[in-house]
Structure formats: C-alpha cells, structure tokens
Image (spheres, rainbow, N blue to C red):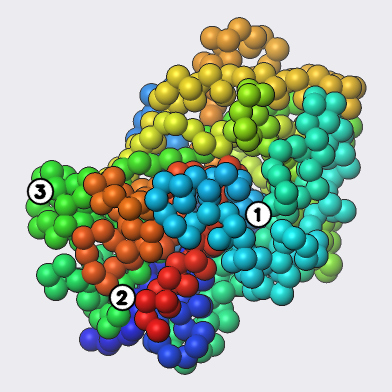
Amino acid sequence: MQTYDFIVVGSGSAGSVVADRLSASGRFSVLVLEAGGTDQRFYVQMPLGYGKTFFDPAVNWNYKTEPDPGLAGNADHWPRGKLLGGSSSINAMVFIRGAREDFDAWAAAGNPGWAYDDLLPSFKAMEDNAAGADQWRGVGGPLHITDCTDAVHPLTKRYLAAGQQAGLPLNPDFNGASQEGVGVYQITTKNGRRMSAARAFLRPAMKRGNVRVETNALATKILFEGKRAVGVEYEQNGQKKTARAGREVILSGGAVNSPQLLQLSGVGPAALLGDLGIPVVHANDNVGANLQDHVGINYTFKGKLPTLNQILRPWWGKLLVGMQYILLRSGPLSLSMNNAGGFFRTDPSMTRPNMQLYFQAFSTVIPKSGERPILTPDPWPGFSIGLSNCRPSSRGEIMIRSNNPRDYPRITPNAYSTNADVDEMLAAVKFVRRIAAMPAMAEIIEEEVLPGPSIQSDADLIQDFRKRSGTVYHPVSTCRMGPDASRAVVDPRLRVHGLYGLRVIDASIFPDNITGNTNAASILTGWKGADLVLEDHT
C-alpha cells in the first residue's frame, strides 16, 4: 500500500484545482482517484461536442432521477462527467460566478471567509479573462475565459434588443458590478477548445513528480481508524486496491458522488446505513440531504430569418462548420449553444434576480434518439428562449440504495414542490413571452412552436412547465457547509463535522444554490478549499 500526503477523490471542477494547488510547492505528494478515463477526446475538446457526450457512457455517469411528481412524473436525465475534468469536460461552458448576495448570505449563515469580498481576489487570481482585467475580472490565471461578443449568431442582437424593450438593461459583464439584464455569455474556452478544469489545472499538475493520477479508479470506501480518515479503498481494472493518506482524504466527487461515498463509508443517516448493513462511523442525517438544483424550460419559436438550423442540419452545412472548426478553431462548433442570456426578477420588490435566461439561435423540437440533438436541429428556422430558476426553495436528497458502490444512488429532486417555486416559474414563463412579443423579436417570429398559442391559462402554463421542465445540471448542497453540526456536513473550513483528516471540497458544500451556472463557483470552491488545507498544513 502506498502512502501519500493527500488523496483527492474526483478530478472534476474542484478536484482538479485542489490537486494542482496542493502539489504546486513540491512539499506534498498527491494521489488523484478518477472513476472515469481520459479527457483527450475530440468531442470533449470541441465546445459544441457536448451534444455527443450528453448520453455517452464512456464519459458520462448518465444518472436518472426517481420519477418526480413535480415534473409530471418524469424521471429526469442527469449527466455528470465521468472523466478527467468531471462535469467541466461535458458542460455548456457558461462562466457565471453568482451574485454578490449569494456569497454574502453564506458568510452571514456562520461561514467566515466566504463573503463575496473575501472570494473576489480568488476569482480574479484563477481567471485569464479575454475581455481584460478590471475591478472585477482577472487576467493571467490558469482558467481562460472567452468573450464571445463578436462571435455570436446575428439573431442574438435581436434577442438583446427585445430584452431591453421588455425593460431589462444591457449588461456587458454578468460577473461585473451587477447581474441583472441581458447580455452575451462568457465561456470557458481557449483558442476554440474547451477549457475544462483538467486542461487548466490538472494537466499542468500531472507534469509534477509529486502528483499521481489514477484513472478508471472507482473509490469504494473511505478507510477510518476510529474517527480519523486514513485512506481510500478503490477498484481499478477489476482489482481492489488501497491507498493511505498521511495528512487528509479530500472528497471532490461532486453533489452526487461525495455524499454517496460518505454513506458507503458509514458517514450519513444512521437509519439508512443500518438498513443497508453498513457499520456507522459517524451518524449525520444531512449527508445527501438538502439537495438543491436549478430547473429550466425552453420556449421555442419558428422564425422568418435563417438560424443555426440551416447550417447545422444539412450534410454540407455540417461539413462547412466542421472544416471551419478544424482549420480555424472558429464558427458554431467553437461556442456554447447558449450564445446569450440574462437575469431578471419576477417581482420588482426583490433585491436581486431570481431567474436566468438563455438564448439559443437554433431549435431541437424533433429529438434524435440517443443524442442530445444539438448537432441535428429542426428542418425549419427555429430558436429558443430558455429560463431557469436561480434559488428555488424545493429540496431533495441523494441516498444510496444498497451497499454496492456500483449501484447508482437514489436521486430525488422534488422539483416544484413548493408553491413559491411554482408561482415564480409561472411569472417567469409569462416574461419569456413578453420578450418574444417585443418588436425586435415579434417581427421575425412566424409562430410559437412550444408550448404553442393554445397554452394560455395559468393552469395550462403550470401543467406545461411541469411536463417539459428538467434539470439544468446544477445540483448542490448535499454535503452543505455550516457551523452547526446538526444542520451541516462540513464546517466553514470544509472539514467533515465529527471526523478528522477528511474534507469535502466541491459544489456539494454550497450552503445554498447560487444565482447562475455553478461551474465557476465549483472551481472557486476548489481554489478556496486548497487554501484552507494549505493553511492547516504549513
């Protein structure tokens, strides 16, 4: 059995950063265990290739939720990255930090050091923003962020104009002074290639002699001596192996895998563990509880002007954009499908936005089996305005269903399980229609395809968004951070309450969800978490 200073379980958005920063000084040895394989795949590196990875079991856990009453009984598809870089290798690359108030609320809940002003220097230090440095943005960091303003589809300008006609300001930087308004999204790419956490952080770390990365290594159990974590048991190529941690075991498996591994190791709800015959190391009902996620829906329109459908659907168009990408690393394949978006309030009395917008200059009403139909859009000029809630009050859970590490856990999101979530989504879909009715958009719309003009009453709109909504892939809070061991899993320094030598550093520690896409804050959590570890091991 080999011993390392630190074992990091998971090479995703946070784990890649943790491995890089803990190994940078050369003082500490780091073992990274990744259940998946390499990220050196064409459709991983090509930004719009995530249409192909959306169901690909070679790089994707392909989780499914329990049938959800709030989503009309649908069992939602939950992609999660199963490769170096984790979900940052298969996501839509939109870079949104979250609102100042989100992080200030974390700190106010008893988590010192997590307020926005505490975190801003870290955000800036980790970034290399192509838009240039200013009071909010950083340059020179490992994570390159692309400004897509000049590359988006021409139809995006109409969307931005319609948003302004509907009363929203034009916002040139959602990561700047404020979030509210409409604007073009920044994305994590560089020179037309995806800038995953693996590319930005883990690949440089792998060149160091004090870092070992084991792929296809499924962590099955944390090893304890009393209340101290001392190592990890894992399976690789059919063999059971163990590795020992001289200093700490760090879980960076994300909102699904971190609580799963804790529960498999005897840390979690005592009743659940007892039923499954797992000896309790430390009882904590919060492990796997408090699940929060953003839920979204698209409104789709048939247009009078060409959209990306006319380029991406025919064989000659695919050939054209393929050549453009391979030769020039530019064109539609070098971007996210979300060209632009925005943030708005469903109630003007709110102090900050509670809804996020997404604009896509193509449509996929007619699905293709086994593929997210990004690369096979509709045969007519279509586009979508999507939206998702930012801070829903619904809570779910992720709990193991057996003591077998290869059995997927039971994911119960409980979407739209509160009246507040239903009410705000009803107001939000009406606002999407208001944007579409503004002159800049209305004059180029042939018809609303989904949900269609027959859906008008509140009851019909609610029924429609229950039927058609789904996750926008931002699950958090299943190992949430807080000072009170009876209400949280980790303390403000991300140490697991009641145990020693064990931390969780990933999006599962978010006390509450943030306003926007969660990847930037996940990477930040890795950065901040590594700082905390290094402070404790000087």
Mark 1 closeness class: few <14, some 14–19, many ≥20 residues within 10 Å: many
Please say whether residue 273 is visible from this viewpoint. Answer: yes
User: Where's residue 200, x and y in %?
Assistant: 61, 72
Q: Is residue 483 left or right of residue 464?
A: left
Identify the secondary structure beneath mark 2.
Answer: strand
Q: Quadrant of residue 340?
A: top right
Q: Residue 274 — which label?
A: 3
Q: Closer to the camera, 42 or 315?
A: 42
Q: What residue type is disc 2 on?
A: Glu
1 or 2: tag closer to the N-terminus: 1
Q: CA distance from mark 3 to mark 1?
A: 42 Å
Q: Quadrant of residue 350?
A: top right
**Does residue 396 sit above or below 51 in this rendering?**
above
Q: What residue type is disc 1 on?
A: Phe
Q: What residue is shown with label 1? A: 95
Give the residue displayed 67% in from the left and 18% down from the top: 430
Of tags 1 and 2, which is closer to the observer? 2
Q: CA distance from mark 2 to mark 3?
A: 27 Å
Q: Quadrant of residue 101?
A: top right
Mark 2 closeness class: few <14, some 14–19, many ≥20 residues within 10 Å: many
Please say whether residue 259 is visible from this viewpoint. Answer: no
User: Where's residue 304, x and y in %?
Assistant: 88, 27
Q: Residue 248 — which label?
A: 2
